[in-house]
Amino acid sequence: VCSPSIGQMLIPLAIARFRDGSPEVRVHLQCLSHELLKERLLSRQMELGVSILPVDHPSLHTAPIAKGLIFCIFPRRHPLAQHETLCLRDLRAHPLIAYPRDTPFGIRIERLFAEHDEPMQTAMEVGSPQDACALVHAGAGVALVDEFSLQAWPDAHFKATALQEAPPVIADLVYLRTEPLSPAAEAFIRALRSVLIERKLSLPSAR
């Protein structure tokens, strides 16, 4: 079970690599919201999670596995395309495709603007960074998205520039503290690490 951002491209690549070595293992994949991800793990419906948002629960263990940046994305002919680097003040004249304020990613983006005392103007609201990528790909505006989401858009009709003030987004492995991971889960983690290393997103193992 995983966050939608990392589940669009990176997790499927890891599953394909894992299945090459373990074709007899049946895999169940679900891309879910933050709360449902926790629920599936706590109820033992799923063994392993990968979340790009912090998971805080006494029964769950988390271990960082990947690090990505926050990028600003915009159509290739947009005025922002003239900038080699971007900071929040560069976005003042460009209302954003934003996220609901009661969602973890929406809270992250809103807090980023507040911490730097910058106004955040919103043009429209979407449910996920993947939705934002689709809209910007269609030429509908400007958005802030995580680097994991961008992996699913290698041929997009937009430009992506890292946002200087934004802290990195950390992806964590998440699983029950009380039960050891199965050999299949351990093998999948190795496959995922190899994919992340190739994409230059991997963090050193802390497990």
Image (cartoon, grey):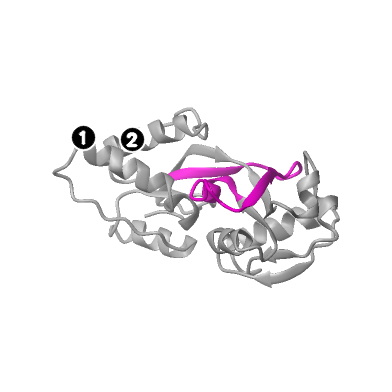
Q: Quadrant of the C terminus?
A: top left
| Residue interval drawn in magenta | 146-175
- Any magenta on residue 46? no
The extreme front residue here reads 77
- Any magenta on residue 174? yes
In the rendered image, residue 145, in percent from the top left (x then y), is placed at 62, 53
Q: Could you say which quadrant of the image residue 192 lies in?
A: top left
Answer left or right for 10 relative to 117: left
Residue at image mark 2: 191
How many residues crowd around disc 1 within 10 Å: few (fewer than 14), some, or many (20 or more)? few
In the rendered image, residue 195, in percent from the top left (x then y), is placed at 41, 35
Disc 1 residue type? Gly
Answer left or right for 12 relative to 69: left
For the point 73% across and 57% down, which residue is it? Answer: 111
The extreme bottom residue here reads 124
Frontmost residue, 107 versus 5: 5
Give the CA distance from mark 2 to mark 1: 9 Å
Frontmost residue, 13 versus 67: 13
The extreme left residue here reads 24
Is label 2 in contact with label 1 (beta carbons under 8 Å)? yes
Q: Secondary structure at mark 2?
A: helix
Disc 2 residue type? Ala
The extreme top residue here reads 204
Frontmost residue, 76 versus 141: 76
Disc on res. 21: 1
Q: Quadrant of the N terminus?
A: bottom left
In the rendered image, residue 52, in percent from the top left (x then y), is placed at 52, 49
Answer left or right for 23 relative to 4: left
